[in-house]
Structures are given as C-alpha cells and as structure tokens.
Image (tube, rainbow, N blue to C red):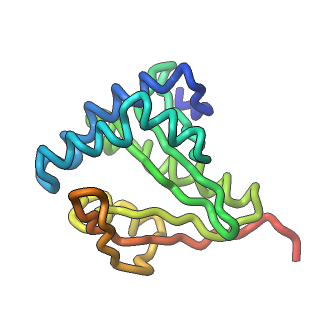
Amino acid sequence: MIKIELAEQSDIRSVSNMAHIIWPNAYGDILSQDQIDFMLEKSYSIEGLAESMVNGQFFYLLKEDGIAQGFVALRTLEDKIRIEKLYLMPDVQGKGFGKVLIDFATEKAVLKGKDIVELNVNRNNPAYHFYLKQGFEVIETVDIPYYDYVLNDYVMQKKVKSSAVS
C-alpha cells in the first residue's frame, strides 16, 4: 500500500539517509564526487534539511507498506507550487512512484488555487525525460552559480487546472 505523509522534524534523519543512498546513484555519472559530497552536506545533512523545513519547504514521505521509499519537498509561491526536491530509492524506481509524487504535487497546486507546478532538473539527468512524459515543458535553461559549482538546469513547468471558480 502506497501512502504519502507530511514529514515531521523526527523524519529528518530518514530523509537524510535516503538522500545519501539516492544521490550517488542518481548523480554519479553527472556530477563530480566532490559536488555530490558538497550537495549532500549542504542540503541533505540534518541541519540542511531542518533549515529547508524552517524556510518554507514542506517534505512529504512516500511510504510503501510503511517503509519510506522516497520524498518530495514542495514550496508554495504566489503563483505556483515548486517541487524543490523529488527523489526515490533506487530499488523502487520504475514502479510508478515518481508519477504518484507528481500527481500529489499537482493535487496540492489545485487545492491551493495554483495553476502551475514548477521544478528544476539537471540538464543531464535522465529524470528530464520522465518529467516531459508527466506533462512538464522547459521554460528556461539556466546556469546557477552555487558556491564553487554551477547548477546546469532546465526550469520546467506543468500547467494544471486550478480548482478556483471563475
């Protein structure tokens, strides 16, 4: 049984542990080991995740039979919902859980009266093709300076039908 639950402060260690398994697998052929280590320390340490939660990211755990298999972090902006993070454990990729998390983010957008879901994806990440299949389109190509690195991303958006009555 698949369930998505709002992550609490007590779930930070679980999210961090998953990220430390997922990132080397997801980015090993795309980023240097130095950058992977830096990003894990900066964004997926206990402190980094706690800071993200305090600064407006809402983390949700995807659980299969009670075991966390992935997570998504959402931020509500004035005109859209942003997917800040979306990751699945390597052994459950291809089971449709990514689509479940995208649909979840889309539902959140509709409930909040937003008609856009947005995310960034590394231009060399195979997940780019998955996002295209989910209805996302590239709206911008960006090179974002981030400490000693440059994040080479696509900004992608998906239009959704808002529940707001016109």
Q: Nearer the viewer, residue 124 or 147?
A: 147
Residue 21 in the figure: left or right of residue 58: left
**Quadrant where the C terminus lies?**
bottom right
Residue 121 position (above or below residue 49) = below
Picture residue at 35% right of the left edge, 71% below the top: 154
Residue found at x 30% / y 37%? 41
Classify 86 as above or below 65: below
Residue most toward the right?
A: 166
Q: Is residue 54 left or right of residue 63?
A: right
Q: Residue 86: x percent and y percent?
A: 43, 47
Residue situated furthest front in the rendering: 147
Q: State the count of labels.
A: 0
Q: Position of residue 117 (x, y in %)?
A: 57, 64
Q: Position of residue 107 (x, y in %)?
A: 66, 54
Image point 35% across, 30% down: which residue?
18
Horizontally, residue 92 falls left or right of residue 102, namely left
Q: Quadrant of residue 165?
A: bottom right
**Residue 4, image x and y in percent?**
58, 34
At horizontal 55% and vertical 59% (from top left) the residue drawn is 82
